[in-house]
Image (cartoon, helix red, strand yellow):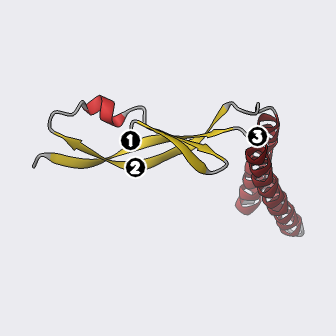
């Protein structure tokens, strides 16, 4: 065997445009809406559970409290993302994430070079540059 296919990480970057900022804002607003709806449901469950039960030693009540706390922290994170996205400067690069990609490695290749520094650069969702693929 002279080659093998392995999985490597590829960095996804976007050039900041007005459209990207709009899309990111919509994604965060939708996520905040979903979290707020879930929080409302959890609060209603908490009220229903509290009626007629000893809330001090109730595992279900404790679990609800934990989940409510988790969702409130999530909402705080989303608020931070809203501010972060609003502060993005047009024309700068923004790291959107990392994906896994297959990579062929042959005898004689530089292993570390083949597995590192792979990037895809987008502008409004369109690939404009591919680095070290």
Dot 2 alpha-carbon crowd within 10 angstroms: few under 14, some 14 to 19, many 20 or more: few
Q: Alpha carbon of mark 1 to alpha carbon of mark 2: how far?
A: 9 Å
Secondary structure category for the residue under label 3 = helix
User: Residue 116: x and y, percent?
Assistant: 38, 32
Residue, disc 3: 81
Residue, disc 1: 133
User: Residue 82: x and y, percent?
Assistant: 81, 41
Secondary structure category for the residue under label 1 = loop
* Disc 1 versus disc 3: nearer the observer: 1
Name the residue rendered at 79%, 61% in the picture.
34
Dot 3 alpha-carbon crowd within 10 angstroms: few under 14, some 14 to 19, many 20 or more: some
User: Residue 14: x and y, percent?
Assistant: 63, 40
Name the residue rendered at 39%, 36% in the picture.
132
Dot 1 alpha-carbon crowd within 10 angstroms: few under 14, some 14 to 19, many 20 or more: some
In the displayed structure, does residue 91 sit left or right of residue 96? Answer: right
Q: Residue furthest front?
A: 128
Looking at the image, is 128 positioned above or below residue 54? above
Name the residue rendered at 32%, 30% in the picture.
113
Sequence-wise, the earlier of marks 3 and 2 is 3
Sequence-wise, the earlier of marks 1 and 3 is 3
Residue, disc 2: 101
Q: Nearer the viewer, residue 32 or 130?
A: 130
Sequence-wise, the earlier of marks 1 and 2 is 2
Looking at the image, is 62 positioned above or below residue 44? above
Looking at the rendering, in which quadrant would you find the C terminus? top left
Cβ–Cβ under 8 Å for marks 1 and 2: yes
């Amino acid at each position: 065997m002279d080659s093998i296919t392995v999985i490597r990480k590829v960095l996804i970057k976007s050039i900041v445009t007005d459209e990207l900022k709009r899309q990111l804002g919509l994604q965060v607003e939708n996520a905040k809406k979903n979290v707020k709806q879930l929080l409302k449901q959890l609060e209603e469950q908490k009220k229903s559970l509290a009626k007629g039960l000893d809330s001090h030693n109730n595992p279900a009540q404790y679990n609800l409290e934990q989940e409510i706390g988790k969702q409130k922290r999530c909402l705080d994170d989303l608020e931070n993302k809203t501010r972060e996205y609003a502060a993005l400067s047009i024309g700068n690069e923004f790291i959107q994430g990392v994906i896994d990609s297959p990579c062929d490695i042959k005898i004689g290749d530089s292993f570390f070079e083949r597995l590192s520094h792979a990037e895809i650069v987008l502008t409004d969702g369109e690939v404009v540059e591919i680095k070290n693929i």
